[in-house]
Image (cartoon, rainbow, N blue to C red):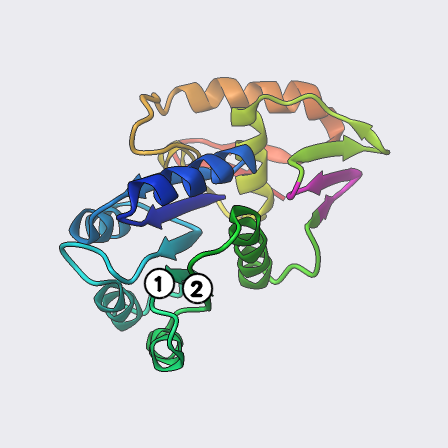
């Protein structure tokens, strides 16, 4: 899953960013509202962690713009604005959850995982596909209770494919979901990772190449 974090307190932002990476998420971090809004307009994310008091563009304005464009991106607000009317305003504008500072970093991760489950209509942190079980919280893939060794890239690609079953996805779309703005990643490398997934998972996945379009897992 790919997350955008917008927080102008660099110490807090760096702590959350590190925690997200440790939890296995792909994450982009910006300290400025305008830069964050540009990222939202030019990239694809599964969730937004948003501070309201951002320089450039206020967090409330970002929420308004997202909801006006009818984007249903899950939004977790993290803010020092802990008064009830501010929390109500954030939720009324379209935020999905509101976490007041100060907070424990583990709570951020728990809120993120809960919002992602809700957005994907999942009842737990476990995804079942044929004889495979993917534990999203621990980032472990198993077959009959035996862990399968996958690289981080392979695991992220598998996760994206299993969350988009029966949908043709291009190499470029896959790259968009498994990389950050700082990654130097050639879309042609996706072919290599797809080949490795097929070799490691064998009959446990039904993954086809659609010539000229991309891949589909069904």
Most common SS among magenta residues: strand
Where residue 96 sits, quadrant-wise, is: bottom left
Q: Which residue is depicted at the point 31% across and 50% down?
A: 6
Secondary structure at numbered mark 2:
strand
Q: Disc 1 versus disc 2: distance between alpha carbons?
A: 6 Å
Check if residue 131 falls in the magenta segment.
Answer: yes
Q: In front: 186, or 147?
A: 147
| Residue at the disc numbered 2 | 100
- 67 is higher (above) or lower (below) than 30: below
- On the rendered structure, is 131 left or right of 77? right
Secondary structure at numbered mark 1:
loop
Q: Residue furthest right?
A: 144
Q: Position of residue 105 (x, y in %)?
A: 51, 47
- On the rendered structure, is 134 left or right of 111? right
- On the rendered structure, is 64 left or right of 108? left
In the picture, the quarter occupied by the C terminus is top right
Please provide the residue range marked out in magenta: 127-137
- Determine contact: label 1, label 2, CB under 8 Å: yes
Where residue 152 sits, quadrant-wise, is: top right
Disc with the residue nearer the chain's start (1 vs 2): 1
Q: Position of residue 14 (x, y in %)?
A: 37, 37
Residue 60 visible, this angle: yes
Q: Which mark is residue 80?
A: 1
Q: Position of residue 187 (x, y in %)?
A: 36, 25
Check if residue 147 falls in the magenta segment.
Answer: no
Where residue 161 sits, quadrant-wise, is: top right
Q: Which residue is depicted at the point 53% across and 41% down?
A: 160
């Amino acid at each position: 899953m790919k997350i955008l974090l917008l927080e102008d307190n660099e110490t807090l932002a760096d702590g959350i960013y590190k925690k997200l990476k440790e939890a296995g998420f792909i994450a982009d971090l910006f300290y400025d509202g305008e830069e964050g809004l540009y990222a939202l307009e030019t990239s694809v994310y599964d969730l937004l962690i948003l501070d309201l008091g951002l320089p450039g563009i206020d967090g409330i304005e970002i929420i308004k713009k997202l909801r006006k464009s009818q984007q249903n991106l899950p939004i977790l607000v993290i803010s020092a604005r802990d008064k009830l009317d501010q929390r109500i305003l954030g939720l009324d504008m379209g935020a999905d959850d509101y976490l007041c500072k100060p907070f424990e970093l583990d709570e951020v991760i728990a809120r993120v995982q809960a919002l992602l489950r809700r957005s994907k209509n999942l009842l737990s942190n476990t995804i079942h596909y044929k004889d495979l079980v993917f534990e999203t919280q621990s980032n472990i893939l198993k077959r009959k209770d035996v862990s399968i060794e996958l690289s981080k890239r392979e695991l992220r690609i598998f996760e994206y494919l299993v969350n988009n079953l029966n949908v043709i996805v291009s190499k470029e779309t896959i790259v968009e979901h498994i990389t950050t703005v700082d990654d130097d990643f050639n879309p042609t490398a996706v072919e290599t990772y797809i080949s490795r997934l097929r070799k490691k998972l064998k009959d446990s996945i039904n993954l086809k190449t659609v010539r000229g379009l991309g891949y589909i897992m069904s």
